Image (spheres, rainbow, N blue to C red):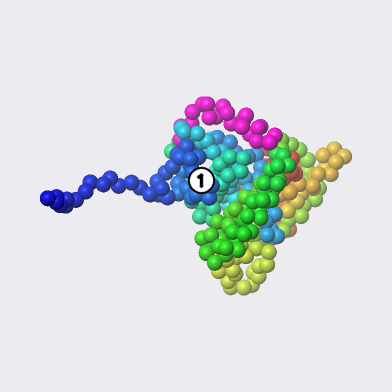
Amino acid sequence: MLEVLVSLDFGYKEPNDCSTLTVAQVLALQPKQKVGKIKAKVVWLQAGSKLVNFRGRQKEVKDCHVADHTGKIRVSLWGGLIGKVAQGVSYVLTDLSVREWRGLYLTATMNTTIQVSEEVLVPESVARQQLEVEQQEEEEVEQEEVEQQEEEVEQEEVEQQLEVEQEEVEQQEEVEQQEEVEQEEEVEQEGITTVREPVCGIQLAYQRQCSSCNEGQLAFNIKAINHRCEACGFYQKVGSYVKAATGTVWVNKGNVKLTLKLTSTVLMTYLSQNNLQELLADVQLVEEHFLEVGMFVIQYNANNVVVVVTTGNV
């Protein structure tokens, strides 16, 4: 005799790409898997960002470590996402991708969002291990890592040929290439140097950045109506592209001439803190400001990239 069941009591389970994962759940994933959402606290933030070369243009990247009650993991942030996090603050991060190089870590994608959340409690043991982990990572940069990076680049080129027609894969491939460039440039010391000197010389240049992917545009016609992004391919109105300035500053430290790189993130932070955003109307106005103010306090890392700049009376 057959028994007919009218309904079955199956519980609903939220899909992985919608639910909030813990750090431990992320660490159980495989490389190249997607992470829809994670909520964690920033327990370590890299002192300065790095400039890496990718497809003929410079890209800005910065690392941080986030943690929750289950553990911690490294997150690489790119372009416009760099200024959206601060150490000791908890966030909800979405649309990340898992990568593996010296252990699993997360990297931001073109769709990543970052929102402040309620405080995430982190065990003292996790915070206590942070400094030891960072020191160990810096000491492990060896020749075998370079060889591994070259193999990954070759593998990535094959994947590009097979997946070039798929828009989603193209976006993923771009992020992968960015991180491989990052790995090749990752010989870095975290030491920060501070100088208190006047700026002797400065050279800035404007570059329009895509509002979608935050990439700089090498060929941009301001008189045009529309422009197709050279990185993500989105066709947009010229007015939607953000004006950003980057360049170098020259200061004297004793008898030594220091030439330091000034990123758009650091420059925009300085102008915003001093209510000087209107100077961006003309790059020469920004240059004249730096020459006329007088004394500056400038902090820079071992790669001569400026981390913080303030006026000397601060």
For residue 254, what is the image quadrant?
top right
* Range shown magenta: 120-140
Q: Amino acid at mark 1?
A: Gln
Q: Is residue 264 visible?
A: no
* Residue at the (76%, 49%) spot, across then down: 249
* Residue at the (58%, 36%) spot, across then down: 44
Q: Give percent across and percent down for residue 138.
A: 68, 36
Give the camera-side residue of 304 and 280.
304
Q: Assign the magenta stretch its main secondary structure.
A: helix
How crowded pointer 1 is (Cα within 10 Å; few <14, some 14-19, many 20+) is rated as few
Residue 312 painted magenta = no
Residue 212 versus residue 223 in the image, above or below:
above
Give the camera-side residue of 214 and 249.
214
For residue 163, what is the image quadrant?
bottom right
In this picture, residue 249 sits left or right of residue 15: right
Give the camera-side residue of 54 and 50.
54
Q: Give percent across and percent down for residue 90.
A: 49, 39
Give the camera-side residue of 136 and 75.
136
Q: Is residue 106 visible?
A: yes
Residue 128 painted magenta = yes
Farthest residue toward the bottom? 224
* Residue receiving disc 1: 30
Q: Give percent across and percent down for residue 297.
A: 72, 39
* Residue at the (66%, 32%) spot, across then down: 135
Farthest residue toward the right? 255
Q: Give percent across and percent down for residue 301.
A: 72, 40
